[in-house]
Image: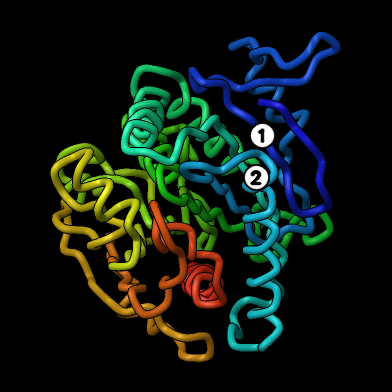
């Protein structure tokens, strides 16, 4: 995991092709030794006291290092603009701190390239170390985020809320990590009951244009129904997404979640439309284990191979993220 201090609100970590963390050394990036993982997190990724919300973002296919960084910065700028509109009264204040997880996702724009990165993303999590590494990262952040029972001078009085955001194949990494943690109860949760009102485990998971079959939650990510998630699993989709539509159909014989929404899941799926900024999301429509959000009227731009697959950096997405954060309170 190679760390970079970009500004006060973003940290970047890098995974190798086998899913292990890399760190910078005088001779170049090298894997972090397994027995130093916890110390490494403590040295490099301690959540700052000023943060109200912790975000872990994993990018998707065809995203280089600078493009991944640009995507996170654009999303944070969009959320800052939306928050400035004053539509989220329970978010007082909103000071996010983000960990961007980068991984080797580039390939040719071709059917073979799409399939190669799909296989790599799956292998990094199932045969490699990505799921365990990200799971332990989330566990570290969860255990060290501020406790609202602590004196205000030491921690945010309202605690710190943990949100996961993935795009495309990055969604698979997050699902594998949280699913792995379902069998490791201390990885993403506290070992003892906490004071009333304290956020616990993962407070929301937003999957933007997920590159996985529509039945992935009943065939692959089967443990998410029992995983350490306090809030919902929210997945957007758009019929203008060719990467998870046409190309996913060719690769896996079925349309992807990012094109057609969540099909089946271990719990009932709430299907809603993506709302415009300024129109509140009622708690009742988001307060489900699985929520499928139709963004076909919003994610529309993009030509060629991928269509609107990467048209997710919009004010509507920021509105959805802020709404999930607000309902976590």
| Vertical relation: 141 (above or below) 207 | above
- Residue 122 position within the rendered picture, expressed as x and y whole percent measured from the top left: 34, 29
Judged from the image, the secondary structure of the residue bearing numbered disc 2 is: strand
Residue depicted at x 83% and y 51%: 7
- Residue 31 position within the rendered picture, expressed as x and y whole percent measured from the top left: 64, 13
Residue depicted at x 33% and y 47%: 211
Identify residue for label 1: 13
| Vertical relation: 85 (above or below) 194 | below
Q: In which quarter of the image is the N terminus?
A: top right
Judged from the image, the secondary structure of the residue bearing numbered disc 1 is: strand
Identify residue for label 2: 99
Residue depicted at x 42% and y 37%: 173
Q: Residues within 10 Å of mark 1 (few under 14, many from 20)?
A: some
Q: Quadrant of residue 275?
A: bottom left
| Vertical relation: 268 (above or below) 256 | below
Residue 184 appears in the picture as rendered: no
Q: Distance between the residues labelled 2 and 1?
A: 7 Å
Indicate the colouring scheme. Answer: rainbow
Disc 2 vs disc 1: Cβ atoms closer than 8 Å?
yes
């Amino acid at each position: 995991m190679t760390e970079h201090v970009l500004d006060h609100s973003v940290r970047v970590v890098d995974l190798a092709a086998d899913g292990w963390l890399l760190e910078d050394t005088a001779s170049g990036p090298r894997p972090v030794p397994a027995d130093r993982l916890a110390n490494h997190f403590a040295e490099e990724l301690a959540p700052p006291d000023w943060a109200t919300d912790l975000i872990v973002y994993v990018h998707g296919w065809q995203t280089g290092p600078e493009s991944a960084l640009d995507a996170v910065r654009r999303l944070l700028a969009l959320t800052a603009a939306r928050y400035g509109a004053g539509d989220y009264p329970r978010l007082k204040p909103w000071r996010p701190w983000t960990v961007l997880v980068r991984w080797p996702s580039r390939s040719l724009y071709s059917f073979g390239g799409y399939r190669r990165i799909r296989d790599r993303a799956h292998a990094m999590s199932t045969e490699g170390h990505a799921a365990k590494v990200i799971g332990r990262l989330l566990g570290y952040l969860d255990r060290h985020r501020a406790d609202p029972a602590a004196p205000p001078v030491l921690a945010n009085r309202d605690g710190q809320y943990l949100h996961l955001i993935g795009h495309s194949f990055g969604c698979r990494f997050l699902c594998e990590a949280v699913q792995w943690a379902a069998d490791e109860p201390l990885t993403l949760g506290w070992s003892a009951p906490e004071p009333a009102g304290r956020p616990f485990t993962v407070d929301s998971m937003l999957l933007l244009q997920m590159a996985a079959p529509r039945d992935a939650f009943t065939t692959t990510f089967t443990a998410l129904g029992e995983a350490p998630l306090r809030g919902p699993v929210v997945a957007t989709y758009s019929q203008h997404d060719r990467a998870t539509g046409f190309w996913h159909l060719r690769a896996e014989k079925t349309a992807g979640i990012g094109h057609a929404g969540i099909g089946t899941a271990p719990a009932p799926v709430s299907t809603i439309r993506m709302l415009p900024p300024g129109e509140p999301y009622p708690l009742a429509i988001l307060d489900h284990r699985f929520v499928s959000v139709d963004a076909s009227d919003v994610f529309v731009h993009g030509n060629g191979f991928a269509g609107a697959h990467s048209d997710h950096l919009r004010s509507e997405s920021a509105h959805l993220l802020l709404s999930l954060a607000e309902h976590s309170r």
